[in-house]
Image (cartoon, rainbow, N blue to C red):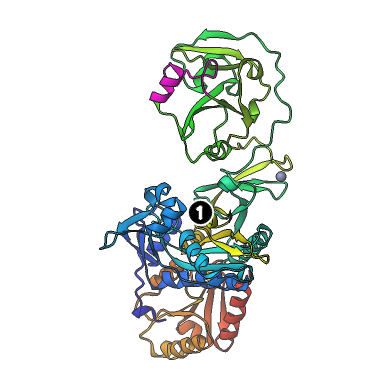
Amino acid sequence: MRYARMLLPTLKETPAEAETISHQLLLRAGLIRKLASGIYDYLPVGLRVLRKVEAIVREEMNRAGAQEVLLPAVQPAELWQESGRWQVYGKELLRFRDRHDRDYCFGPTHEEVITDLVRREVHSYRQLPLNLYQIQTKFRDEIRPRFGLIRGREFIMKDGYSFDATEAGADETYQAMYEAYGRIFSRCGLRFKTVEADSGPIGGSFSHEFMVLAETGEDVVVSCTACAYAANLEKAQVAPPSNPGSDPPAPLEKVYTPEVRTVTEVADFLQLPVEKVLKTLLYETEAGVVAVLLRGDHEVNEVKLKNFLKVQDVNLATEAVVQRETRAPVGFAGPLGLQLPLYADHSLRSTANLAAGANEDQHHYINVNIERDLGIREFADLRQVAPSDFCPRCRGALEFLRGIEVGHVFKLGYKYSQAMNATYLDAQGQEQLMYMGCYGIGVSRIVAAAIEQNNDADGIIFPVPLAPFQVLLVPIAVNDTHTMGVAEPLYEELTALGLEVLFDDRDERPGIKFKDGDLLGIPFRVVLGPKTLAREAAEVRHRRTREMQLVPLNALPGFLQDRLRMEMLP
Ligand SMILES: [Zn+2]
C-alpha cells in the first residue's frame, strides 16, 4: 500500500478521552475513530489488524471441526420471550419496533437464533454433533462504555454454539474448543492465562475464561504460584480454614459503643483485631431478605452468594430495609435476635469472642460465640479470596494478576434446548434434548488487548501475526530519482513475494516518517537513502528490539522473509 494515498490520520497529541494505552494508541495511530459513545469506525489500518485476528480465529475454528454461518443481527422478540430472556436481560438489550409494531432487538448474543435454526433443521442423532460459529457485529448497551475497543457498545465477536446428543459428547466438543482457543491466542502472539470462571447455576468447572494479562485489565485473576490452579476473582474458591478458632469462650455481653459504626471503628473502640469483628450484611433477593455473616477483614462475593442461594439477584439491602429488619440504625446490625435466615462464611466456623452489632442504637455485643449463640442455617464459601489465602488445591501461595477477558468457553447444558424445545430422535426413536455449549471470542477486543500488551513510549509494537503490515519501506527523499529508482521496484518485488509492505511515499521529512512508523508498530522498517544506496544496501530496523543492521539489497527479500517466518511461529 502507498502511504500517500491512504486514509491514515495519525495524531501527535494523546486524545484526552482515552484512558488506557490501547485506546490512546488506536486513536493516535489512526486505526479507529469514535462515532458515538462506545461505537467506533475502523479505518483501513485498523481493519487490516481486525481481519488478521478474524483469519486466525476462522482457521482454528474450522480446523477444530466447527462450521461458519452468518446469522441476522436483528432478532425477533418472540425468540427471546421463548427463552425467557426478553424479561430478564435488562437495559443492555437494545430493543426497537419495526413499522408493523413488532418488537425486535439488536443481538448481543445468539443462543436463541441458533437454537431456533437447529431445532428446525436437525431431527436425528445422525446429524449430531454440530458445532456452528459466526464472526459478527454485536451490540450491548453498556451503561458506561470505556477503554475504546475493550468495552464498547458495538463490537465484533466470534460466537460459537455446539449441539451434542449426550453430555459426554458435549465434553469432547468443549475440550476441542478449549484447545482451539489456546492455539488462537498463542498464534495471535498474546500472553494469556486460562482460568476457571463462574458458570452460574450449572456449577462445576464447566466454564473457562481466557485472560490476556495486562495491568489495565478490568478482571482480576487469582493464580497459584505452586500448581496450575487459576480462576477469576468471582469464581476463586477459598480453602477451608485448616485450624478453626480455639479461643476459650467468654460470656456474652452487651456494651455501649457511641457513634461506632464501621468495622474499623468497632475494632478500634473495643481494641480488637478486625478479624474479631463480625460483619453482618443484609441482602435482598427475590426469595426474601437474608443475613450474611463474615469476618470483619473479609469481603462478600456476591456471585458465590447468588449461586449458593440459587437466586437470580442479590442486592445489598437498602437503609430502609436494614432499619425495618434490625429495628436499629445502619451500623448496628447483628445476628442476635434477627428474624432472618443466617448464612455464615466458612472462616467463622467454631469462632468465639467476636464483636457484633446489637440491633440497638449505640450498642454492640462482645464475646459472641458462633455455635453457642447463633442459629446459623448454613456455613458456605461466601467470600472473596484474599491475598493472604492459600490455593484451594495445594495450599500454595496465591498471586493476583489483572487481565482482559478475550475468550470464554461455557457448557450451557439443556438451558436453551429445553426452553425452546430443541430435540432429536435417538437410535431407539426416543425424543431427547440436545446438549449445548457456547464459545465466545472478543475479536475487536483482541486488537486492543494486543496493544495493551505490546507497546512502548513511541507507540504500538504489533506481534507479527497481527501487524497491519509486515514491512515499512521508507525512501528518505521521494524527490530523489536515484532513491526512488531503487525503492519503487523494491516495493513491487517485496509485494510480489507476498510480503505486506507499507510504502511511505509521502513527501515528508524522515523524522516524521520514522515517528509515524514507530507509532504504527510495523515489525520491520527498511530505509533507503543516498548513504545506504552508496553501499548497495538498506538499513533494516526491528521495531521491538530497535536492533539496526545494513542488509545488502540483493539479500533483502530473503532476509525479511526469514525473519518474518521466525516471528510468525507461536
Ligand atoms: Zn496450588
Say which element carries label 1.
helix
Residue type, mark 1 in image: Ala
Q: Nearer the viewer, residue 556 or 324?
A: 324
Range of the magenta residues? 320-340
Q: Is mark 1 within 8 Å of ligand 1?
A: no
The percent position of residue 518, horizontal first and vertical second, equals 46, 68
Residue 416 magenta-highlighted: no
Query: Quadrant location of ligand 1?
Result: top right
Residue density around tag 1, few if under 14, some if 14–19, many if 20 or more, within 10 Å: some
Q: Is residue 151 visible?
A: no
Query: From what the image shows, is residue 257 above or below residue 302?
Result: above
- Tally of numbered tags: 1
In the visual, does 190 lie left or right of 15?
right
Where's residue 414, x and y in %?
57, 54
- Magenta span: chief secondary structure: loop
Q: Residue at x 55, y 69 (%)?
A: 122
Q: Would you place residue 545 above or below residue 411 in this image?
A: below
Please indicate, yes or no, whether residue 165 appears anywhere in the rendered image.
Answer: yes
Residue appearing at x 56%, y 84% in the figure: 556
Is 179 placed left or right of 58 in the picture?
right
Mark 1 sits on what residue? 419
224 or 322, which lies in front?
A: 322
Q: Quadrant of the C terminus?
A: bottom right
Q: Dividing the image into 4 quarters, which one contains the N terminus?
A: bottom left
498 w.r.t. 380: above or below: below
The residue closer to the viewer here, 2 or 291, is 291
Q: Is residue 324 magenta?
A: yes
Instruction: Give percent across and percent down for residue 6.
Output: 36, 77
- Horizontal side of 470 relative to 375 (left or right) equals left
